Image (cartoon, rainbow, N blue to C red):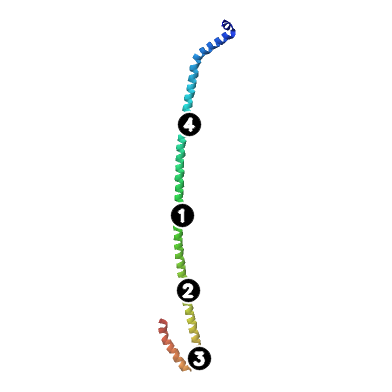
Amino acid sequence: MLRFAESPEFWVAVAFVIFVAGLWNKVAPLIASSLDARAARIEKDLEEAAKLREEAHALLAQYQRKQHDALKEAADIVAQAKVEAERYAARAVIELDGALKRREQLAMQRIAQAEQQALQEVRAAAVDIAIAATSKLLVGKLDAGRHDALIDAAIKELPRKLNA
Protein backbone atom coordinates (compact mmCIF):
# COMPACT_ATOMS: atom_id res chain seq x y z
CA MET A 1 0.00 0.00 0.00
CA LEU A 2 2.83 2.27 0.38
CA ARG A 3 3.45 2.13 -3.19
CA PHE A 4 0.12 3.71 -3.75
CA ALA A 5 1.04 6.72 -1.59
CA GLU A 6 4.17 7.32 -3.54
CA SER A 7 2.50 7.94 -6.84
CA PRO A 8 2.10 11.59 -7.88
CA GLU A 9 -1.32 10.93 -9.36
CA PHE A 10 -2.53 9.90 -5.95
CA TRP A 11 -1.39 13.12 -4.38
CA VAL A 12 -2.89 15.15 -7.22
CA ALA A 13 -6.18 13.37 -6.64
CA VAL A 14 -5.96 13.97 -2.86
CA ALA A 15 -5.13 17.64 -3.45
CA PHE A 16 -8.01 17.91 -5.89
CA VAL A 17 -10.45 16.38 -3.37
CA ILE A 18 -9.21 18.74 -0.63
CA PHE A 19 -9.47 21.68 -3.02
CA VAL A 20 -13.02 20.73 -4.06
CA ALA A 21 -14.01 20.13 -0.41
CA GLY A 22 -12.63 23.52 0.58
CA LEU A 23 -14.19 25.19 -2.36
CA TRP A 24 -17.47 23.36 -1.73
CA ASN A 25 -17.81 24.97 1.70
CA LYS A 26 -17.60 28.44 0.17
CA VAL A 27 -19.37 27.84 -3.17
CA ALA A 28 -22.23 25.65 -1.93
CA PRO A 29 -23.99 28.45 -0.01
CA LEU A 30 -23.61 30.74 -3.05
CA ILE A 31 -25.06 28.10 -5.37
CA ALA A 32 -27.85 27.35 -2.89
CA SER A 33 -28.72 31.03 -2.46
CA SER A 34 -28.63 31.54 -6.23
CA LEU A 35 -30.91 28.55 -6.75
CA ASP A 36 -33.22 29.73 -3.94
CA ALA A 37 -33.37 33.22 -5.49
CA ARG A 38 -34.12 31.74 -8.89
CA ALA A 39 -36.81 29.46 -7.40
CA ALA A 40 -38.34 32.46 -5.59
CA ARG A 41 -38.28 34.47 -8.82
CA ILE A 42 -39.89 31.61 -10.76
CA GLU A 43 -42.51 31.17 -8.01
CA LYS A 44 -43.24 34.92 -8.10
CA ASP A 45 -43.54 34.78 -11.91
CA LEU A 46 -45.88 31.79 -11.65
CA GLU A 47 -48.05 33.59 -9.06
CA GLU A 48 -48.16 36.68 -11.25
CA ALA A 49 -49.02 34.55 -14.29
CA ALA A 50 -51.80 32.85 -12.30
CA LYS A 51 -53.08 36.25 -11.18
CA LEU A 52 -52.99 37.56 -14.77
CA ARG A 53 -54.78 34.41 -15.94
CA GLU A 54 -57.53 34.93 -13.34
CA GLU A 55 -57.86 38.57 -14.41
CA ALA A 56 -58.04 37.48 -18.06
CA HIS A 57 -60.76 34.94 -17.21
CA ALA A 58 -62.67 37.61 -15.28
CA LEU A 59 -62.38 40.07 -18.19
CA LEU A 60 -63.44 37.36 -20.64
CA ALA A 61 -66.49 36.55 -18.53
CA GLN A 62 -67.31 40.26 -18.21
CA TYR A 63 -67.05 40.80 -21.99
CA GLN A 64 -69.10 37.68 -22.65
CA ARG A 65 -71.82 39.06 -20.34
CA LYS A 66 -71.63 42.41 -22.11
CA GLN A 67 -71.87 40.68 -25.50
CA HIS A 68 -74.83 38.62 -24.29
CA ASP A 69 -76.51 41.77 -22.95
CA ALA A 70 -75.82 43.62 -26.20
CA LEU A 71 -77.27 40.75 -28.25
CA LYS A 72 -80.33 40.67 -26.01
CA GLU A 73 -80.73 44.43 -26.32
CA ALA A 74 -80.35 44.21 -30.10
CA ALA A 75 -83.00 41.46 -30.20
CA ASP A 76 -85.30 43.63 -28.06
CA ILE A 77 -84.74 46.59 -30.40
CA VAL A 78 -85.52 44.43 -33.44
CA ALA A 79 -88.67 43.07 -31.78
CA GLN A 80 -89.77 46.58 -30.82
CA ALA A 81 -89.08 47.79 -34.37
CA LYS A 82 -91.21 44.95 -35.74
CA VAL A 83 -94.07 45.93 -33.42
CA GLU A 84 -93.70 49.59 -34.48
CA ALA A 85 -93.65 48.60 -38.14
CA GLU A 86 -96.78 46.48 -37.72
CA ARG A 87 -98.51 49.34 -35.89
CA TYR A 88 -97.52 51.81 -38.62
CA ALA A 89 -98.66 49.37 -41.31
CA ALA A 90 -102.01 48.89 -39.57
CA ARG A 91 -102.43 52.66 -39.20
CA ALA A 92 -101.48 53.15 -42.86
CA VAL A 93 -104.07 50.56 -43.92
CA ILE A 94 -106.74 52.34 -41.85
CA GLU A 95 -105.75 55.74 -43.22
CA LEU A 96 -105.66 54.39 -46.78
CA ASP A 97 -109.07 52.78 -46.30
CA GLY A 98 -110.45 56.09 -44.97
CA ALA A 99 -108.92 58.01 -47.86
CA LEU A 100 -110.36 55.56 -50.37
CA LYS A 101 -113.81 55.85 -48.75
CA ARG A 102 -113.60 59.65 -48.86
CA ARG A 103 -112.57 59.56 -52.53
CA GLU A 104 -115.36 57.11 -53.27
CA GLN A 105 -117.88 59.40 -51.55
CA LEU A 106 -116.52 62.39 -53.44
CA ALA A 107 -116.74 60.47 -56.71
CA MET A 108 -120.31 59.41 -55.89
CA GLN A 109 -121.21 63.05 -55.13
CA ARG A 110 -119.67 64.17 -58.42
CA ILE A 111 -121.56 61.43 -60.26
CA ALA A 112 -124.80 62.48 -58.55
CA GLN A 113 -124.13 66.12 -59.46
CA ALA A 114 -123.37 65.12 -63.05
CA GLU A 115 -126.60 63.08 -63.14
CA GLN A 116 -128.58 66.05 -61.79
CA GLN A 117 -126.95 68.37 -64.29
CA ALA A 118 -127.62 65.91 -67.12
CA LEU A 119 -131.26 65.59 -66.01
CA GLN A 120 -131.61 69.38 -65.91
CA GLU A 121 -130.03 69.66 -69.35
CA VAL A 122 -132.32 66.91 -70.70
CA ARG A 123 -135.36 68.61 -69.12
CA ALA A 124 -134.26 71.98 -70.49
CA ALA A 125 -133.76 70.42 -73.95
CA ALA A 126 -137.14 68.68 -73.70
CA VAL A 127 -138.78 71.94 -72.66
CA ASP A 128 -137.07 73.76 -75.52
CA ILE A 129 -138.19 71.07 -78.00
CA ALA A 130 -141.70 71.10 -76.56
CA ILE A 131 -141.83 74.89 -76.73
CA ALA A 132 -140.53 74.87 -80.29
CA ALA A 133 -143.03 72.18 -81.32
CA THR A 134 -145.88 73.92 -79.56
CA SER A 135 -144.83 77.20 -81.07
CA LYS A 136 -144.88 75.69 -84.56
CA LEU A 137 -148.26 74.11 -83.94
CA LEU A 138 -149.71 77.24 -82.45
CA VAL A 139 -148.31 79.54 -85.11
CA GLY A 140 -149.79 77.41 -87.81
CA LYS A 141 -153.22 76.83 -86.16
CA LEU A 142 -153.90 79.87 -84.01
CA ASP A 143 -155.19 83.16 -85.08
CA ALA A 144 -153.72 86.40 -83.82
CA GLY A 145 -156.32 87.00 -81.08
CA ARG A 146 -156.02 83.57 -79.58
CA HIS A 147 -152.24 83.88 -79.86
CA ASP A 148 -152.17 87.07 -77.78
CA ALA A 149 -154.46 85.53 -75.13
CA LEU A 150 -152.15 82.52 -74.66
CA ILE A 151 -149.07 84.75 -74.34
CA ASP A 152 -150.81 86.87 -71.71
CA ALA A 153 -151.79 83.71 -69.74
CA ALA A 154 -148.23 82.40 -69.93
CA ILE A 155 -146.83 85.73 -68.69
CA LYS A 156 -149.26 85.70 -65.73
CA GLU A 157 -148.18 82.15 -64.75
CA LEU A 158 -144.47 82.84 -65.21
CA PRO A 159 -143.77 84.23 -61.68
CA ARG A 160 -145.54 81.25 -60.07
CA LYS A 161 -143.56 78.73 -62.16
CA LEU A 162 -140.21 80.49 -61.60
CA ASN A 163 -140.66 80.40 -57.80
CA ALA A 164 -141.64 76.74 -57.77
The kind of residue tagged 3 is: Leu
The kind of residue tagged 1 is: Lys
Q: Mark 1 vs mark 3: give the one in front.
A: 1
Q: Do the residues labelled 4 and 2 touch (CB within 8 Å)?
A: no
Q: What element does badge 1 sit on? A: helix
Q: Nearer the viewer, residue 52 or 145?
A: 52
- Residue of label 3: 137
Q: Are marks 1 and 3 in contact (CB under 8 Å)?
A: no
Residue 68 horizontal/vertical position (percent): 45, 45
Q: Mark 4 vs mark 3: give the one in front.
A: 4
Q: Mark 4 vs mark 1: give the one in front.
A: 4
Q: How crowded is mark 1: few (under 14 residues within 10 Å), some or many (20 or more)?
A: few
Q: Which of 77 and 116 is in front in this view?
A: 77
Q: What element does badge 4 sit on? A: helix
- Residue of label 1: 82
- Whichever of callouts 1 and 3 sits on the residue coming sooner in the sequence is 1
The kind of residue tagged 2 is: Ile
Q: Which residue is drawn at 50% across and 88% down?
A: 133
CA separation in Å, label 4 and label 2: 90 Å
- Residue of label 2: 111
Residue 111 horizontal/vertical position (percent): 48, 73
Q: Residues within 10 Å of mark 2 (few under 14, many from 20)?
A: few
CA separation in Å, label 4 and label 1: 48 Å
Q: Mark 2 vs mark 1: give the one in front.
A: 1
- Whichever of callouts 4 and 2 sits on the residue coming sooner in the sequence is 4
Residue 99 drawn above or below residue 16: below
Q: What element does badge 2 sit on? A: helix
The kind of residue tagged 4 is: Ala
Pick out the residue farthest to the right: 8
Q: Which of 44 and 89 is in front in this view?
A: 44
CA separation in Å, label 3 and label 2: 38 Å
Disc ID at residue 49? 4
